[in-house]
């Protein structure tokens, strides 16, 4: 019996097929106009949660599910992306008169008995509004290449320029409460009277006991990393061999060139405050004069 030569419904993203184990660039989410990468069932994490799918299907049912997930109940292809490089090239169809193009390898009896995809997932993909509604700021991903942090205003994370910036002149840091960065007075302040430093956990600054403390017994200094203060091994260390001092402003300690230098001509010592070393008036000597 001759079968009708109806055109088959295209599926999305032919860059990775069954049996193809060569590394490829990450696939984008199946939902149209979604800029995020696919994580599970060719959907991003946000649209996977919206579909109510919490766990991956068993390995034996994965192939069978792929035969269904890209075709709507009306046997119409799902619009996948507006990007030219993601135009489909392979085809699948479930019409009674249309041939089915399956995976490279035959499915086992266990995989062929799998049922259709979750109804919530099909309703998400076939909805006319789910792919056009704007996503909230808390669910968007930074537009910067290979960055998966949450995007703020402008489509980028805080580290890549997203969100509000400090209102202080020539300052590009992220703004906290009050419209300024922490260095310029933004955010919460220490609860101790007459202290203008930034508050950490507990409502106090580091000097007054705020934030985490060093885990070494009888040490009340602030913990930097691994639960230790700088004196007990916390924070980054100098990269010079046999030097265990704390790194300043990069990968070197002050003695080996790390951190800012004194602004006095011909002086290469580390600057303590106001661009000066201790010998030239920086540090406590400068504060006492003020």
Image: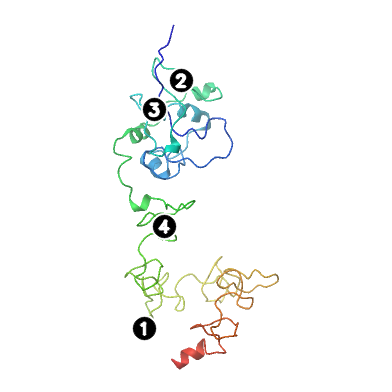
Vertical order, 44 against 212 (above or below): above
Read off the residue under disc 2: 100
- Left/right placement of residue 213 relative to residue 9 reads right
Colour mapping used in the image: rainbow
Q: Which of the two labelled residues, at mark 4 and mark 2, occupies the earlier sequence position? A: 2
Q: Which of the two labelled residues, at mark 2 and mark 1, occupies the earlier sequence position? A: 2
- The residue at the far right in this view is 242
Q: How many residues crowd around disc 4 within 10 Å: few (fewer than 14), some, or many (20 or more)? A: many
Residue 182: x and y in percent read: 40, 72
Residue 109 showing in the rendered view: yes
Per the model, the C-alpha gap separating discs 4 and 1 is: 34 Å
Which mark's residue is nearer the viewer, 4 or 1? 4
Read off the residue under disc 4: 157
Per the model, the C-alpha gap separating discs 2 and 1 is: 76 Å
Per the model, the C-alpha gap separating discs 3 and 1 is: 66 Å
Q: Which of the two labelled residues, at mark 3 and mark 4, occupies the earlier sequence position? A: 3
Q: Is the C-beta separation of discs 2 and 3 under 8 Å?
A: no
Per the model, the C-alpha gap separating discs 2 and 3 is: 12 Å
Vertical order, 42 against 102 (above or below): below
Read off the residue under disc 1: 194
Residue 123: x and y in percent read: 33, 33
How many circles with numbers are drawn on the protein?
A: 4
Mark 2 lies on a secondary structure that is loop
- The residue at the far top in this view is 1
Mark 3 lies on a secondary structure that is loop
Per the model, the C-alpha gap separating discs 4 and 2 is: 44 Å
Q: How many residues crowd around disc 3 within 10 Å: few (fewer than 14), some, or many (20 or more)? A: many
Which of the 4 quarters of the picture holds residue 261? bottom right
Q: Which of the two labelled residues, at mark 3 and mark 1, occupies the earlier sequence position? A: 3
């Amino acid at each position: 019996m001759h079968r009708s030569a109806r055109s088959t419904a295209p599926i999305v993203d032919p860059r990775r097929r069954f049996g193809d184990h060569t590394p490829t660039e990450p696939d984008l989410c199946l939902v149209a106009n979604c800029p995020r990468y696919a994580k599970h069932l060719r959907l991003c994490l946000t649209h996977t949660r919206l579909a109510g799918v919490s766990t991956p299907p068993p390995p034996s049912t994965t192939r069978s599910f792929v035969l269904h997930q890209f075709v709507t109940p009306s046997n119409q292809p799902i619009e996948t992306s507006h990007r030219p490089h993601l135009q489909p090239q392979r085809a699948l169809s479930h019409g009674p008169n249309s041939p089915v193009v399956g995976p490279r390898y035959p499915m086992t009896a266990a995989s062929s008995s799998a049922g259709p995809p979750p109804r919530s997932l099909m309703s998400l993909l076939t909805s006319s509004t789910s792919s056009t509604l704007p996503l909230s700021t808390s669910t968007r991903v930074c537009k910067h290449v290979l960055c998966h942090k949450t995007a703020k205003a402008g489509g980028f994370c805080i580290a890549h320029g997203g969100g509000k910036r400090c209102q202080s002149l020539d300052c590009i840091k992220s703004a906290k409460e009050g419209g300024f960065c922490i260095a310029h007075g933004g955010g919460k302040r220490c609860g101790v009277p007459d202290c203008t430093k930034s508050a950490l956990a507990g409502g106090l600054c580091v000097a007054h006991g705020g934030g985490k403390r060093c885990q070494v017994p009888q040490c009340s200094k602030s913990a930097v990393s691994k639960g230790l203060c700088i004196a007990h091994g916390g924070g980054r260390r100098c990269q010079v061999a046999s030097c265990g001092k704390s790194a300043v402003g990069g990968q070197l300690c002050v003695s080996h060139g790390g951190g800012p230098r004194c602004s006095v001509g011909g002086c290469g010592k580390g600057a303590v405050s106001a661009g000066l070393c201790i010998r030239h008036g920086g540090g406590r000597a400068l504060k006492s004069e003020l």
